[in-house]
Amino acid sequence: MQSKNSVKIKNSNIKAGINLLHDKLSRLEEELKTLRNIAVAFSGGVDSTFLLKVAKEVLGKNAAAITIDSPLYPRRELDHAIKFTADNKIKHFIIKNDCFIKPDFTKNDKLRCYYCKNDAFTKIIETAKTQGFINIADGQNKDDSSDYRPGADAALELGVMSPLKKHGFTKEDIRQLSKEMGISGWDRPAFACLASRVPYGTRITPSLLEKIDRLESFLIEKGFVQVRVRHHGKIARIEIAKEDFPGMLGKNLMEEVVSEFKKAGYIYVTLDLEGYNAGSLNRLIL
């Protein structure tokens, strides 16, 4: 049983944490107020959704979203982004982008993300300027610095702002504030582009990404929330949250998963015993 003093200390720590969180939000809002307008590179994920919502509240009609429509992202992600901007009456510009015409992307070396982001941000900046937006921001947060993300270099080189990272927002901060603000999807699972499922050096093709997307959608339909299907030639390595292991290992579902993956061309179907691990393929180069 906790003593009264320990309860007071715990409550004091919680209050201090909440105050720190709202201080970050205040600093973000103050920075946005100094801008005439802003266009947010909007994927529909938790981070860019939070930034866009705050920008809309601070700048009103002078905040907009720009989304890349690419084979690298499932249609469900684009649909979510479109619904959010419509529900919140935010200007939304959508740009078609065929990354497969770029040899630097399809060869899939360790700078793939840099080439892809450089191309995407260049298009976003062009669209923003055409529409009269002079400031462009993305949804990078403090936690992103802990992983290998060459795409962040492309953003920096092109002058794209990363205000969430600048003000020290972590993913948990963003989820907590998004929940407080009533932002739909605050608890959505983290999502990375489908190319991140393919080891560096393996050529990326439309059919490969379509297969990965189809299999991840299959697992999501079966009730798994955080899902990755990592492609290793004829081996599929499934990553799900550890707490979901019992569901996956039920006899009927396990056989159904194996059957579905083998129909897609995999000879071996494996479950990663470490569970879901963001950016796990980066271990091959770090």
Image: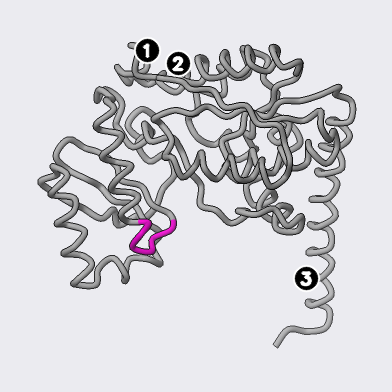
User: Where the N terminus falls, by quadrant?
Assistant: bottom right
Residue drawn 37% across the image and 66% down it? 244
Q: CA distance from mark 1 to mark 3?
A: 54 Å
Q: Nearer the viewer, residue 95 or 59?
A: 95
Q: Nearer the viewer, residue 259 or 90?
A: 90
Position of residue 236 measured from the top left corner of the image (x, y, whole percent):
21, 45
Q: Which mark is residue 115?
A: 2
Which residue ends up furthest to the bottom in the rendered image?
Answer: 1
Stretch of the chain drawn in magenta: 220-225
| Helix, strand or loop at mark 1 | loop
Residue drawn 31% across the image and 18% down it? 106
Q: Which residue is mark 1?
A: 102
Q: Which residue is mark 3?
A: 10
Q: Which quadrant of the figure has residue 168?
A: top right
Q: CA distance from mark 3 to mark 2?
A: 47 Å
| Helix, strand or loop at mark 3 | helix
Position of residue 88 measured from the top left corner of the image (x, y, whole percent):
72, 45
Q: Earlier in the sequence, mark 3 or mark 2?
A: 3
Q: Amino acid at mark 1?
A: Lys
Report whether 221 appears left or right of 120.
left
Give the overall secondary structure of the magenta segment: loop
User: Where the C terminus falls, by quadrant?
Assistant: top left
Position of residue 100 measured from the top left corner of the image (x, y, whole percent):
34, 18
Q: Amino acid at mark 2?
A: Tyr
Q: As displayed, is residue 233 above or below residue 240?
A: above
Q: Amino acid at mark 3?
A: Lys
Residue 270 among magenta residues: no
**Crowd rating for badge 1 (residues with CA inside 10 Å; few <14, some 14–19, many 20+):** few
Q: CA distance from mark 2 to mark 1?
A: 9 Å
